[in-house]
């Protein structure tokens, strides 16, 4: 079994650690030259702000909705990333850091997976203030899908295990374009062949 640990809205979450008053308020983080949006809080997403959107195009939206705007601080984000990965390494011996805010965990030999993942999630938040979602599956791709579900559905409390006997039910409704490694061109091609879901 593999788990994918993914920090939620990572750059925005890092900014909130030192400014708790920004919890539940819209945040966007802009690229180095403050040109484009490279991170958004959930609240900013709800307002329709898209990734990569030029900052000048959303000036009115920012002003109208009192959106908090930050320039990138990669030193800060790198420090938080290192802390998160160190916590994971202390708990799980075999981890693969996939990006600044994601890591795969090899859970072979571990039992009570759900409780383990909940405790990992709790420890990361307690020690860093960064919320994470954890998806678990038989492969890394399935762990990615499980993570997507954990992040989108609050009833799972940030952890979702894609069990082998339930995979078909989930995958039959999971859009093809949301699968790890399926880009827009390949997604378009597959849809022309009437392949619409992961199932």
Image (tube, grey):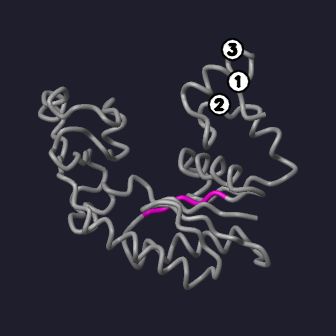
In contact (CB < 8 Å): disc 2 and disc 1: yes
* Secondary structure category for the residue under label 3: helix
Foreground pick, 152 / 106: 106
Where residue 41 appears, as percent x and y from the top left, is 33, 47
In contact (CB < 8 Å): disc 1 and disc 3: no
* Secondary structure category for the residue under label 1: loop
Where residue 106 appears, as percent x and y from the top left, is 69, 71
Foreground pick, 85 / 112: 85
Other-residue count near label 2 (Cα within 10 Å), few / some / many at <14 / 14–19 / ≥20: some
**Residue 175: numbered disc:** 2
Where residue 33 appears, as percent x and y from the top left, is 15, 46
Where residue 48 appears, as percent x and y from the top left, is 33, 29
Q: Which residue is mark 3?
A: 192
Tell me, yes or no, whether the highlighted magenta stretch contains residue 132.
yes
* Secondary structure category for the residue under label 2: loop
- In magenta, the rendered stretch is 131-135
Q: Quadrant of residue 178?
A: top right
Q: Nearer the viewer, mark 2 or mark 3?
A: 3
Tell me, yes or no, whether the highlighted magenta stretch contains residue 173.
no
Q: Is residue 70 above or below residue 128?
A: above
Q: Which residue is mark 1?
A: 196
């Amino acid at each position: 079994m593999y788990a994918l640990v993914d920090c939620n809205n990572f750059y925005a979450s890092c900014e909130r650690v030192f400014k708790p008053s920004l919890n539940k308020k819209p945040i966007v983080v802009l690229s180095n030259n403050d040109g484009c949006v490279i991170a958004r809080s959930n609240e900013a997403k709800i307002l329709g702000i898209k990734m990569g959107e030029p900052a000048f195009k959303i000036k009115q939206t920012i002003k109208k909705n009192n959106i908090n705007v930050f320039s990138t601080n990669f030193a800060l984000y790198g420090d938080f990333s290192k802390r998160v990965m160190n916590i994971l390494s202390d708990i799980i011996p075999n981890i693969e850091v996939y990006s600044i805010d994601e890591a795969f965990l090899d859970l072979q030999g571990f039992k009570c997976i759900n409780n383990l993942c909940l405790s990992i999630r709790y420890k990361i938040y307690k020690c860093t203030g960064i919320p994470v979602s954890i998806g678990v599956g038989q492969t890394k791709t399935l762990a990615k899908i499980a993570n997507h579900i954990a992040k989108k559905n609050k009833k799972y409390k940030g952890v979702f295990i894609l069990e082998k006997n339930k995979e078909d039910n989930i995958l039959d409704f999971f859009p093809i374009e949301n699968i790890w490694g399926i880009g827009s061109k390949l997604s378009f091609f597959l849809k022309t062949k009437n392949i619409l879901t992961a199932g």
